[in-house]
Amino acid sequence: RTDDAITAFLRNPDGELGYVGCFTGNTSVGSGGSGACQDSHQGTTASGTNSGWNGLERITISPDGLNLYATAASDHSLVSFAAGGGGALEYERCVTGDKGGSGSDGNGKCLDMDAGAGASVPLATADGSGSPLEFAGQVLVSPDGLDVYVTSCAYGVAHFTRGLAPPDPQQGAPLFSGCLSGLSDGPAACAKTPSTGEYGGLMAPTDIEIASDGSGSSLFSRSKSSMDSAHFFSAAAR
């Protein structure tokens, strides 16, 4: 997280790890500094700020093994890669809720999360606050590989679909679909839980998990605020 970097390893048959390399959005770690990592596709920035990689929080790999997704809390962003053999990663897309930082009104290193979403209200904000990706935390791909979920440590859970339909050249790149907020004054684009606020059950969610029984799925979210709680959602199978 401090280096704003993602490091790749190969897992040997005996379980040992072999170092492959790393990628960074931080100038000090990339070609302009120590050279320990390759510069990200978007290029690096001083201290990684507004690189789309600042404050990398969580990573996950899709069940089909085609994509790796990473969240960056400080840049309010979600980054996707195509995962190849031998630990290779190919950058696909960065979407952000911070329009004035790494978004369209800033340095343009990421797409505003509004891009292609067809949202009726703005999603990205001037500094990321109040966006569905504010302080992006855990990222999770559904067992069927169709959806990506990201916790906003400020508001709730954001939902993205994976661009899997050909001829999309960015297979698996995320596209915003909706969100659910535990705050009554959360993002206007988000649906609200029945109970909102500090004791509503979905304030500052930190963890999410999905269980599927074949006929549908349940998403479980743990919130950490003044009272720890779990929230449960269900979705019909597609």
Image: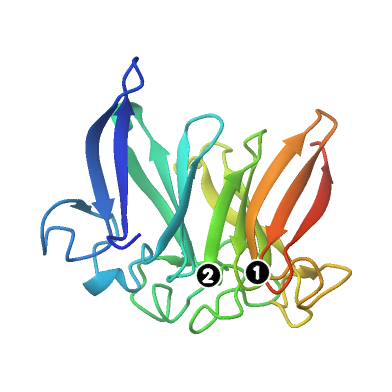
Residue that sits furthest to the front in the current view = 227
Task: Check disc 1: other Cα within 10 Å, few if <14, some if 14-19, many if 20+.
Answer: many
Residue 128: numbered disc: none
Residue 204: numbered disc: 1
The quadrant where residue 150 appears: bottom right
Q: Is 210 placed left or right of 59 in the picture?
A: right
List x then y, in percent, for residue 162. Answer: 58, 45
First reached walking from the N terminus: tag 2 or tag 1:
2
Say what secondary structure mark 1 lies in: loop
List x then y, in percent, for residue 172. Answer: 52, 42
Quarter in which the N terminus is drawn: bottom left
Q: Amino acid at mark 2?
A: Phe
Q: Is 38 placed left or right of 10 in the picture?
A: left
Task: Check disc 2: other Cα within 10 Å, few if <14, some if 14-19, many if 20+.
Answer: many
Residue occupying the point 36% across, 21% down = 15
- The answer to whether residue 204 is visible is yes
* Tag 2 residue: 135
